[in-house]
Every structure is written in C-alpha cells, then in structure tokens.
Image: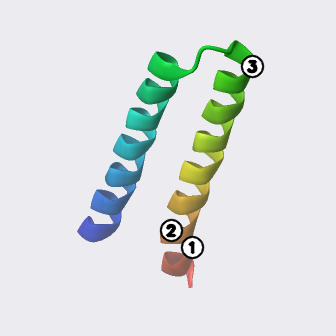
Amino acid sequence: MVLLLISILTIIVVGAICFWAIEKFATDRRLANLLKLLVVLICLGAIVQRILPMTY
C-alpha cells in the first residue's frame, strides 16, 4: 500500500514538473493548453493503471 502511494506521488510530481516546463517554454497558448491536457490524461491513466490491479 505504501508503494502504491509513493508511485502515485511520483506520478503527480512528474506531472507538476511537466506543467512547469510547459508554462515556461510553450509560447503559443493553444499549444500549451493542449499539452497540459495531454499531461493530465497521461497522469490520470498512469494512476488508474496503478490502482486498477488493487480492485481485484
């Protein structure tokens, strides 16, 4: 259970770093919003992938 929480926290930290990098380096707002949406979807997918085996 602790490893699950650590992996979810790691995913969130990596997502936050990606958000910061997008804010800093993306010049086009539409592209930045699209990249942020992509980061959110990937992070949610990774979190669901970690939690789903625990439901069986």
Q: Secondary structure at mark 3?
A: helix
Q: Which mark identifies residue 36?
A: none
- State the image coordinates of residue 5 (x, y, percent, origin top left): 32, 59
Query: Total label count?
Result: 3
Category of crowding for the residue at label 1, using alpha-carbon neighbours closer than 10 angstroms: few (below 14), some (14–19), many (at least 20): few
Sequence order check: which comes first, mark 2 or mark 3? 3
For label 2, the residue is: 51
Q: Which mark identifies residue 30?
A: 3
Quarter of the picture holding the N terminus: bottom left
Q: Are marks 2 and 1 in contact (CB under 8 Å)?
A: yes
Q: Give above or below for 39 relative to 22.
A: below
Q: Nearer the viewer, mark 2 or mark 3?
A: 3
Q: Amino acid at mark 1?
A: Leu
- State the image coordinates of residue 27 (x, y, percent, origin top left): 60, 14
Q: Give above or below for 1 relative to 10.
A: below
Q: Give above or below for 32 relative to 7.
A: above
Q: Residue at x 51, y 59 (%)?
A: 47
Q: Which mark identifies residue 52?
A: 1
Q: Amino acid at mark 2?
A: Ile
Q: Residue at x 33, y 52 (%)?
A: 10
**Could you tell me how far apart the alpha carbons at marks 2 and 1 are, in whole angstroms?**
4 Å
**Could you tell me how far apart the alpha carbons at marks 2 and 3 are, in whole angstroms?**
32 Å
Extreme-bottom residue of the structure: 56
Query: Is 28 in front, or is 48?
Result: 28
